[in-house]
Image (cartoon, grey):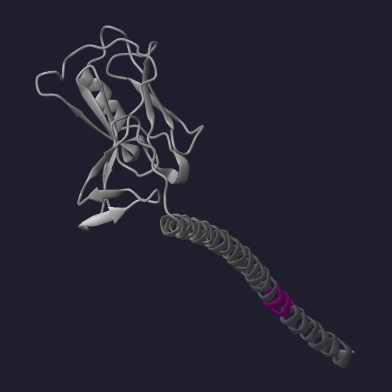
Amino acid sequence: MNYIFPSATINYVIYTAKRIGQFPTIQYVSGGTAGKEVVTLNNTSLSTPKITIKIEEGVSTNEQIIQAILEAKDLSVKSLYVNDLISVEVILGHKRDKNIKTNITYLSNGSLILPPEDKIMHNDGILVDELEAVPTKSFIYTPSSLELTANASAQSEEYVQEDVQSVTDLTNSLKTNFNKLVSAYNNEVLSTLLEVRLNYNAMVSLTNELKEKYNDAVLLINELKTRLDAIITKK
């Protein structure tokens, strides 16, 4: 089954939905600065998120608005950017057209193309021709049970990927902190060992010095004893 996504045109800028079942509304509001237009995304509804573009009335051009949308960093549900929800193009020759604030604009005129079968019977029993287009004034897509299952599976996979990334980040953080602790511990131990060695060397040096003085004292005592013996012998 193929889809013609709904779209809307604001001052020669064509906005077209890019995702099945998510058809945002568009609104220009005043209070912005030309060249620094602010794009926000209010996800009050999964099926109709609201895209708001703050412009400088009478100054902001179509080209500047499109650039702001392409660079918008406000996230939607499941980390989707504004330019993931809509495509934007300007009609040739209207890039520099200036803009004013608008009311909320809804995307419309979407349609679905039925599968390539000679005849397809709807639930109400009506037969339609091959590849018949079923237009809607404001197309609302109702997913089948298989598509709902696929979407749920994709969302679950995305949750798992986010959880895996969170665990990976936490593991890396713990590893970094552990390495810091080990490094600090090793530095502290090394510093202590160096201090002990310095103290030990100082004690050895002092011991050797005392030993030399002891030997000198023994020699002096022996010399005095020899002289004393000599004096006693003469008497």
In the image, residue 207 lies in the stretch drawn in magenta: yes
State the residue at coordinates (63%, 63%).
188
| 81 left or right, relative to 120 | right
Look at the image and tell me in which quarter the C terminus lies. Answer: bottom right
Residue 64, given in percent of the width and then of the height, sits at 24, 21
Residue 223, given in percent of the width and then of the height, sits at 76, 84
The residue furthest top is 58
Whether 210 is drawn above or below 64: the answer is below
In the image, residue 228 lies in the stretch drawn in magenta: no
State the residue at coordinates (38%, 11%).
30
| Magenta stretch secondary structure, dominant | helix
Residue 33, given in percent of the width and then of the height, sits at 33, 13
State the residue at coordinates (32%, 34%).
136
Residue interval drawn in magenta: 206-213
Q: Quadrant of residue 59?
A: top left
Q: Quadrant of residue 60?
A: top left
| 75 left or right, relative to 196 | left
Whether 204 is drawn above or below 90: the answer is below
Total number of numbered discs in the rendering: 0
| 5 left or right, relative to 12 | right
Relative to the observer, which residue lies in front, 190 or 168?
168
Relative to the observer, which residue lies in front, 188 or 129?
129
Relative to the observer, which residue lies in front, 199 or 225?
199
The residue furthest left is 93
Residue 124, given in percent of the width and then of the height, sits at 39, 48
| 158 left or right, relative to 229 | left
Whether 113 is drawn above or below 44: the answer is below
